[in-house]
Image (tube, rainbow, N blue to C red):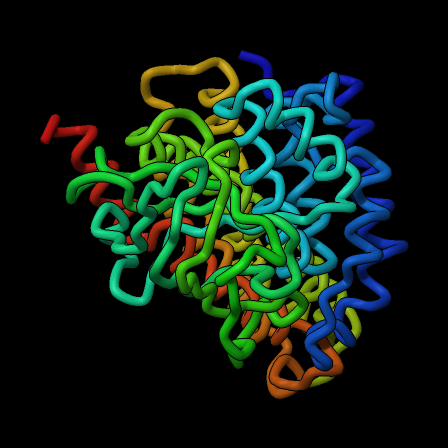
Amino acid sequence: MDFSLNSDQLQFRDLAAQFARDEMAPHAAKWDEDGIFPVETLRKAAVLGFGGIYVRDDVGGSALTRLDAALIMEEMARACPSTAAYVSIHNMAGWMIDVFGNEEQRQRFLPAMSTMDLIASYCLTEPGSGSDAAALRTRATRDGDHYVLNGSKAFISGAGSSDLYVCMVRTGDEGPRGISCLVVEKGSEGLSFGAPEKKLGWRSQPTAIVNFDNCRVPVTNRIGEEGEGFKFAMAGLDGGRINIAACSLGGAAACLDKAMAYMGERKQFGKPLTEFQALRFKLADMATELDAARLMVHRAAHALDTNLPEKTRYAAMAKRFATDRGFDIVNAALQLHGGYGYLMDYEVERYLRDLRVHQILEGTNEIMRVIISRDLLGH
């Protein structure tokens, strides 16, 4: 058991950290305030290999591991959790095509996805099916060499801006075995988008409903066979949960650093806040919980990389723990800033707003408990 990173991992981490400092941190507050989706910055990240982190290299991917990806996501999220999370979503969509798609699909989509000349969204949730994802109702009816789609997807990151939509749709009977996976391309007949949602956080990426009104999609855009889509979606979410947990680590780490810096400068009762034992103990608890969460995330990533039988449980545990503790650490950092923590100038409030949704998406933390308990008890 070796807890140290190898030289390549240190290099990936440092590269991501420098990119976050230079290209993301100076602009993150404006992206948040003005609702700017920084596509050109995403493409700069892709130049470093972050557009296809665990996509195979024959189609332009970096062919890295899930642990490598967790290191990259944490560093990017130190600057902007919202933008880092979109990079995770795009990578999840690319991975699904790389692993479950055929060779023609890999060659057609992945080179441009790896450079982020094509950006992608993942479409599972619907207005009537969130946690009960297998109850989705968007219907795809076969019509010759096309499917005709009718229905809607909700809370879709990148909706209206993305070029590709990796969608779970119903081609068969009720339940998970009736679900298939289709790649819907922007500009498809019958594809439209709702108005951008007004959100608490994650404001550097657009979120909207995706509508299908007799939307025609070629059969050649189906990933895998009919009925395999739900299995693909769940496999994608194992990695997505690790990434979103890593984004919580990054946001929490940034706010812990901000709290320590503020406490060294701020004086009350004639001495710096760092001299008050109660506040020192709070920092100690924050740092301990952050380190525990990081260890769980790295273990889950290793389990996915090595295909351990416990991989889904470990991913759910890491997601539940890291997103809960990450939000708590940011909230504690805000409290340590006092009234200043509530001001946009100090940025902790932006991290608080961004990290709150991590406890909801990629499966709510209540659903993570369902997954964990089901794995423990066998039912």
Residue drawn 55% across the image and 40% down it? 93
Q: Position of residue 160 (x, y in %)?
A: 60, 65
Task: Reply above or below: 197 against 254.
Answer: below
Q: Position of residue 79 (x, y in %)?
A: 74, 58
Residue drawn 29% across the image and 39% down it? 179
Residue that extends furthest to the right in the rendered view of this protein: 22
Residue drawn 61% across the image and 76% down it? 349
Residue drawn 38% across the image and 53% down it? 149
In the picture, measured across the screen, residue 187 lies left or right of residue 38, that is left
Q: Position of residue 69 (x, y in %)?
A: 64, 33
Task: Reply above or below: 305 against 295.
Answer: above
Q: Identify the image quadrant of the C terminus.
A: top left
> Could one spot residue 171 in this view of the protein?
yes
Task: Reply above or below: 38 against 300.
Answer: below
> Could one spot residue 296 in this view of the protein?
no
Residue that extends furthest to the front in the rendered view of this protein: 144
In this orientation, which residue lies closer to the viewer: 287 or 58? 58
Tell me which corner region of the image, top left, top right, bottom left or bottom right, holds residue 151: bottom left
Task: Reply above or below: 256 against 74.
Answer: below
In this orientation, which residue lies closer to the viewer: 91 or 185? 185
In this orientation, which residue lies closer to the viewer: 228 or 308? 228
In this orientation, which residue lies closer to the viewer: 374 or 143? 143
In the picture, measured across the screen, residue 116 lies left or right of residue 324, that is right
**Number of numbered discs visible in the structure rendering:** 0
Q: Position of residue 98 (x, y in %)?
A: 58, 25
